[in-house]
Amino acid sequence: MNGAPVTETLQINMWFDYTCPHSHSGLALTKDLSQQLGCVINYLPYLLRPFAPIPDFGPSNPSNITQIPMGQPLKSGTETLVEPFSNRTLSTVLVHEATAFATTHMRFFEFYEAISREYWDYGADIGSLYLIRKATLQAGLSWESMWETLSRSSFRNWVLEQHEQAIIQGVKTIPAYLIGSNLWQGTLTRFDLESAIKQAL
């Protein structure tokens, strides 16, 4: 021990939802910030439709999953993201549970990008097990383990608690970032986000 002070790594909470185009843009901005600025970004669920019914889990075994027809792509000719007409499942609880599983296996971005690509680019149903299985495999995760986790609702309470915590923190719009003691909400530029993080370091 040389007596040098121990510097704690800055922890940033970012709340997002899959069906929010601003969250989608915000996540793209943060992808390399952790490594670049020496901080940790915790990606946490926020439910734009917290009272939407959560669909029944579905088939009784992990191999009995069928593809649901795709809807319309979500990008206009100008690449503007709008919420899809093809979004049949209103609740995002299940996909956030699956994301929590991916995060515990250090595959957050791999899983998130696989889900988002199918949702925003191809109009996939955000709550379909077919989509979750496809993203699970693309992210290099075990579908059997994911299935077990979802069938037990292992992360259900955690997802709901994170949404409630966001409300307690004062989150009213997403993406939202708790950086140090300051809460930032809505669309931020890369420059604004970096500046806020650097001020808190």
Image (cartoon, rainbow, N blue to C red):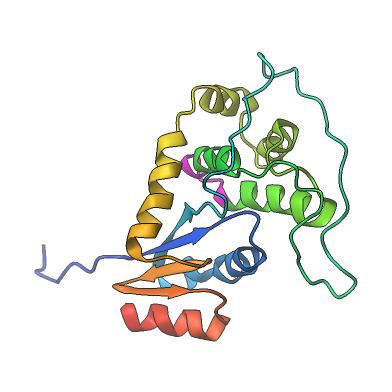
Q: Which residues are magenta?
A: 103-108
Q: Position of residue 144 (x, y in %)?
A: 61, 22
Residue 104 belongs to the span the image colors magenta? yes
Count numbered badges in the picture: 0
Q: Looking at the image, which residue is at 61% across and 34% down? A: 141
Q: Is residue 113 left or right of residue 171?
A: right
**Percent coordinates x, y for residue 83 in the rendering:** 74, 59
Residue 175 or residue 190, whichever sits in front = 175
* Residue 32 place in picture, x, y as percent: 55, 68
Q: Quadrant of residue 59?
A: top right
From the viewer's perspective, is 59 left or right of 13? right
Closer to the camera in the image, 36 or 181: 181
Residue at screen point 51% across, 67% down: 173
Image quarter hosting the C terminus: bottom left
Image quarter hosting the N terminus: bottom left
Q: Residue at x 50, y 54 (%)?
A: 46
As drawn, 177 above or below 144: below
Q: Residue at x 67, y 14 (%)?
A: 61
Q: Nearer the viewer, residue 163 or 15?
A: 163
On whether residue 34 falls in the magenta region, the answer is no
Horizontal side of residue 118 vs 147, given as left or right = right
Quarter assignment of residue 130: top right
Q: Position of residue 108 (x, y in %)?
A: 55, 49
Q: Nearer the viewer, residue 185 or 136?
A: 185
